[in-house]
Image (cartoon, helix red, strand yellow):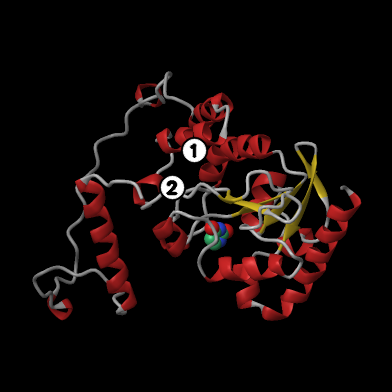
Amino acid sequence: MTTMAPWQTDWHIARATLEWQLDMGVNEAICDAPVNCYDLPQKREAPQAKAPAAPAQARAEPAQDAPDPIALARHAAESAQDLAALQAALAAYDHCELKLGARNLVFADGQPNARVMIIGEAPGREEDRQGKPFVGEAGQLLDRMFAAIGMGRENPDPAKAVYITNILPWRPPQNRDPSSDERAMMRPFVQRHIELIDPDILILMGRISAGTLLDTTEGITRLRGQWRDIMGRPCLPMLHPAYLLRNPPMKRHAWADLLSLQARLRDTT
Ligand code: URA
């Protein structure tokens, strides 16, 4: 657990309050004093004439020396010589706003010497709380899926172990999809993470993971089950367990992909 500054605590209280209000069905923000909508003036006052726009050349130019967050991420990631340094570099990276709303940086779990590295999307509520990837309902399904082929994050045998991380280490608010900017900022860190773990096989768990690392907008239902190559190593896009929880009939595809992974591991011992 990281220690929070008082302003961060306030942020969490404010978010929890808003989430509670949304759960209670609040869908509109109103003022303290009641407004009688039937008594409003029929005509709004004409808006004041706006000041003329500044000529194009006089408008503020983007600062020449504004740091490029992706270049900074690349530099920070490439400088990390081991996992602890990479985690510290992520913790020190201040250009992704998701960090402000997260309780914890969710770095990784499992065995760093595993032959298989799984890359998911982003932490959810439970992962944010515990600081570990894939520990909520979807994570429990992920564990059962890999247990079905004799593999797991706790297994000390590298041939049967998995190592798990995400594209984003911070939970997006309301579990929204990460933006393309957020994904682009985190990509150098994920690439360095792959280099440091040096797995034989990568599993791209779900649409966001496959889309970010394969640089494609192709849907995951098309991509899944097709072996690809990233950074000189085979990778298999799979359906995300959260998707499987919502679409149980698709589990048969996940099973086919797990068998394909098992065969590939056997062929490449
Ligand atoms: N979904 C993910 O993609 N990653 C997690 O860590 C949890 C849920």
> Residue 75: image x %, image y %?
54, 25
Position of residue 23 in the picture relative to residue 90 (left or right) = left
Taking the spot 63% from the left edge, 49% from the top edge, the residue there is 111
Residue 56 spot, x, y in % from top left: 40, 26
* Disc 1 secondary structure class: helix
Along the polypeptide, which appears first: circle 1 or circle 2?
Answer: 1
Q: Say which residue label 1 marks.
A: 87
* Furthest residue toward front: 156
User: Mark 2 = which residue?
Assistant: 105
Q: What residue type is labelled 1?
A: Gln
Q: Can residue 242 be seen in this view?
A: yes
Q: Do the residues labelled 1 and 2 touch (CB within 8 Å)?
A: yes
Instruction: Count residues near mark 2 (Cα–Cα under 10 Å), then give few for <14, some for 14-19, many for 20+.
Output: many
Q: Is residue 158 above or below residue 69?
A: below
Residue at image point 73% right, 75% down: 250
Report the front residue among 153 and 91: 153
Confirm if mark 2 falls within 8 A of ligand 1. Answer: no
Q: In which quarter of the image is residue 220?
A: bottom right
For residue 20, above or below residue 228: below
Q: Residue furthest right?
A: 267
Q: In which quarter of the image is ligand 1?
A: bottom right
User: How far apart are labels 1 and 2 at the CA level?
Assistant: 9 Å
Q: Circle 2 — which element?
A: loop
As shown in the figure, which amino acid type bears the numbered disc 2?
Leu
